[in-house]
Image (cartoon, coloured by chain):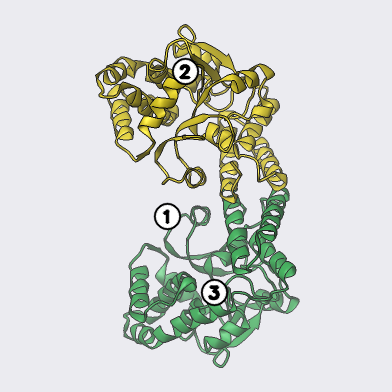
Chain colours: A green, B yellow
Amino acid sequence: MQTSFDCLPCFIRQAIDASRVFALDPPLRERIVREVLSWAAEMDFNRPPAIIGGRIHRRLREITGEDDPYREAKSLQNRMALRLLPRLKEEVAGADDPLWMAARLAIAGNLIDLGVNGEFAEEDLLREVHSALSGPFAGPREAFRREVERAESILYLADNAGEIVFDGLLLDRLPPGRVTVAVRGVPVLNDATLAEAEEAGLTGRFEVIENGSDIPGTLLEECSPEFRKRFADADLILAKGQGNFETLSGREEKIIFLFKAKCAVVARRAGVEVGTSVILGTRL
Amino acid sequence: MQTSFDCLPCFIRQAIDASRVFALDPPLRERIVREVLSWAAEMDFNRPPAIIGGRIHRRLREITGEDDPYREAKSLQNRMALRLLPRLKEEVAGADDPLWMAARLAIAGNLIDLGVNGEFAEEDLLREVHSALSGPFAGPREAFRREVERAESILYLADNAGEIVFDGLLLDRLPPGRVTVAVRGVPVLNDATLAEAEEAGLTGRFEVIENGSDIPGTLLEECSPEFRKRFADADLILAKGQGNFETLSGREEKIIFLFKAKCAVVARRAGVEVGTSVILGTRL
């Protein structure tokens, strides 16, 4: 999707927030803010906003030599999610439609993002998950099931740490032996990489591949040739999170996006209200 | 005051909003947004944010050849305020402390800003004014009175159209024969110029001078030499609105600011919560 003028304030905020995580001192923080402003001044608004997000983090890694300052937060998010997992598994198993419940929970897992600033009590987190499940939702249940059952090969694009544990619930309900999970190739924000997929217990049960890129989304031209081939060969792509929607919506491949529309620009593009959980396909 | 990173999103919003008023087509709108981003990338953060506001409007006047697209809105704001004036005069006359009531009303007049998008009914507007009077407020009543009574010459820096009608209430309560009113020298946003001071009925009753500048505030180095001399010679400056606070706070002259803190950056600088009406002096 295109970048909106409304994304510009968000770029600045991302630069400031990330500067804090990378523990930049004020002169360096000012430098990165100025750089982001000049990138934005020259940027191609026809390209997705996630590109600037990726560029901010790439630059911060260069400036600081720090590879993954979100590592600890990601691990915390995974641990929080793992503690909930047994109860969530029971809920899926007991649901009228386990596949659909697992898909809804996989989207709800995005709320673990909130956990960056502190450890939630298990009960509080479970309450948040249930509240997410009862929130606004848009998605075609039967078309989703049909596409998932029909696909000989599914490429599942994961999103954040923590959330990737919830993804396990949905992955377990997909046709066995047909699924590959893809994670970011380089740490960016709290996005899941191979390390987080391992922590979440996915590597033992599924083939997990890296996409070769450091964009918080899936920008194919920046992904590895191996990943691009897997992407092209898959019957169906399941793409989690806003970043993947930003970078892949409008493509020709058969992609089903599963995400919560967290900002006005993405919500407008998806045709829903902000805060809506969405299952939306390129060809549904 | 300095420009905060938090001002940057606001610059973008100002450029987009002003593009709409100047009726720019999408390519020109994109051009001005890109220009604002590159100015911001190079700007001196030690200088006040109002500079970028002024520069945006200067550029839009250059691009479009349009001198004052806010003219009609300003006239509407003045007319709305003038309709309320008789009742507000009665309220001041009947108040326990007419000077203080007039000062509070002069600040409340800023809410006419809201009227840009449509004509308010008189009763609705009066309700808004009373609600503004009962909102959060910070200011030293006795020190204000003392400084006003002591000053041999007062330079009153006006702010917006509409609001300038309310300023008349306070101007009438200042020591007669000692007051000069200053307005912007060039139209910018809905700020009051000589035309709006005339509409508000001030020119007949007070000396009204122009500051020679097109900044939505008072940036002395961009004002005319005549204005600068009047500024330096005044015993007391009464400065209305956020723009004047942004550009004049921290100076050595005796200035009393009267404004509503409408954004977090200004509120923090003034030491109050957002939404507070403030009377604050450089030497109070």
Number of numbered discs overlaid on the protein picture: 3
At x 63% / y 32%, what residue is drawn?
A: B54
Assess disc 1: are there few (<14), some (14-19) or many (≥20) residues with their C-alpha within 10 Å of its C-alpha. Answer: some
The answer to which quarter of the image holds residue A278 is bottom left
Q: Which residue is mark 3?
A: A160
Residues at marks 3 and 1 touching, judged by CB atoms closer than 8 Å: no
Query: Seen from this angle, which residue lies furthest top?
Result: B204
Q: Give the x, y percent position of residue A13.
A: 57, 56
At x 57% / y 82%, what residue is drawn?
A: A196
Q: Is residue A157 above or below residue B9?
A: below
Q: Give the x, y percent position of residue B33.
A: 65, 41
| Three-letter residue code for mark 2 | Ser
Residue A132 vs residue A225, the one in the foreground = A132
Q: Are marks 2 and 3 on the same chain?
A: no
Task: Write down the chain letter for disc 1.
Answer: A
Is residue B24 at all visible to an observer of this figure?
yes
Residue A233 vs residue B68, the one in the foreground = B68
Callout in the foreground (2, 1): 2
Q: Give the x, y percent position of residue B95.
A: 26, 23
Task: Write down the chain letter for disc 2.
Answer: B
Q: Give the x, y percent position of residue B279.
A: 42, 34
Q: CA distance from mark 3 to mark 1?
A: 22 Å
The answer to which quarter of the image holds residue B275 is top left
Residue A273 circle label: 1
Q: CA distance from mark 2 to mark 1?
A: 38 Å
Is residue A222 at all visible to an observer of this figure?
no
Q: Which residue is mark 2?
A: B75
Residue B195 vs residue B28, the one in the foreground = B195
Assess disc 2: are there few (<14), some (14-19) or many (≥20) residues with their C-alpha within 10 Å of its C-alpha. Answer: some
| Three-letter residue code for mark 1 | Glu
